[in-house]
Structure formats: C-alpha cells, structure tokens
Amino acid sequence: MDYDIKKGNYGNIEGDGLRSMMELAFGSAKMEGDTCVSSYGAMTRIEVKIKSKTSLDINTVSDKNVSVDIATETIKRWNAFLEEVTGFNSKERRNRLQKKAKEGKL
C-alpha cells in the first residue's frame, strides 16, 4: 500500500533514517535490497520501501491468532511508526486515503 510523505519529512527517512526509525519502533530492522524489513507483535513481516520523496510502499503480513493485548500494542506501535515516517497522523492519513479512493487513485 502506498503512503504519502509530508512535504519536508523525506529528509528524516533518507539514507539510513528509515532503517533507524524501524529499529526504534520495532526493535530490529534489516535491509533487503532497497526494502527495509522488520517484524513486531502481530505483524510477522513489515516491508517498507521509499518510492520517491513523496511516497512509501508498505506491505505487512499479520498473525490473526494473537492475544488482544499483543494486537493493541502492535497497533499503537504501528500508528506511531507511520506518523514518524510519513509526518501525517492517523486522521490525516485516513483523510488522504479517502480522498484518493473518491478520485479513483487507489
């Protein structure tokens, strides 16, 4: 799924910044080519690739058989990570996705 990057936020993730942010959020991260890969809690695989200065490509694989506590903590960490790398909070990301859906760009 594509996520927009807020203007001016690209500088925080370029170079080794994205991997550092993933390590901070999820405990570990490694590079597989140009994709940063990690895992945490209910998410068994998190793949993040910088497409451009304005866009990230993010794919996840989730384990649906985890406890509610693990799922809740995973969601909190995930939202904090997305806000850090995109510069948009969850409400702003939702509004941008809704706008793209209405325009048929998804």
Image (cartoon, rainbow, N blue to C red):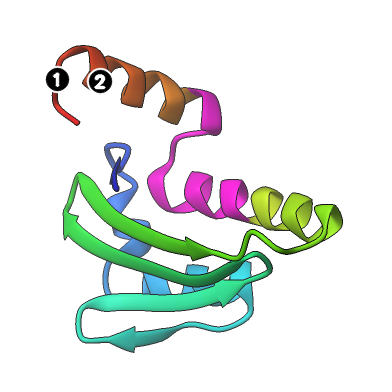
Q: Pointer 2: what residue? A: 101
Q: Residues within 10 Å of mark 1 (few under 14, many from 20)?
A: few
Residue 94: percent from left, percent from top:
44, 25
What amino acid is at disc 2?
Answer: Ala
From which residue to which does the magenta span run? 78-91
The residue labelled by disc 1 is 104
Q: Is residue 100 above or below residue 27?
A: above
User: Which residue is at the front of the view, 9 or 64?
Assistant: 64
Residue 43: x and y, percent? 57, 66
Q: Position of residue 2 (x, y in %)?
A: 26, 45
Above or below for 69 versus 30: above
**Residue 37 covered by magenta stretch:** no
Image label count? 2
Q: Main secondary structure of the magenta part?
A: helix
Kindly identify the residue that appears in the image at 52 percent across and 24 percent down: 91
Measuring 78% from the left and 61% from the top, which residue is drawn there? 70
Q: Residue at x 25, y 20 (%)?
A: 101
Screen quadrant of the C terminus: top left
- Of residues 63 and 98, the one nearer the viewer is 63
Characterize the local packing of mark 2: few (<14), some (14-19) or many (20 or more) Cα atoms within 10 angstroms: few
Residue 46 versus residue 23: which sits nearer the camera?
Answer: 46
Question: Looking at this view, is 16 or 81 the one in front?
Answer: 81
Horizontal arrangement in the rendering, residue 30 relative to residue 27 (left or right): left
Looking at the image, the residue that sits furthest to the top is 102
Badge 1 marks a residue whose secondary structure is loop
- Residues at badges 2 and 1 in contact (C-beta under 8 Å)? yes
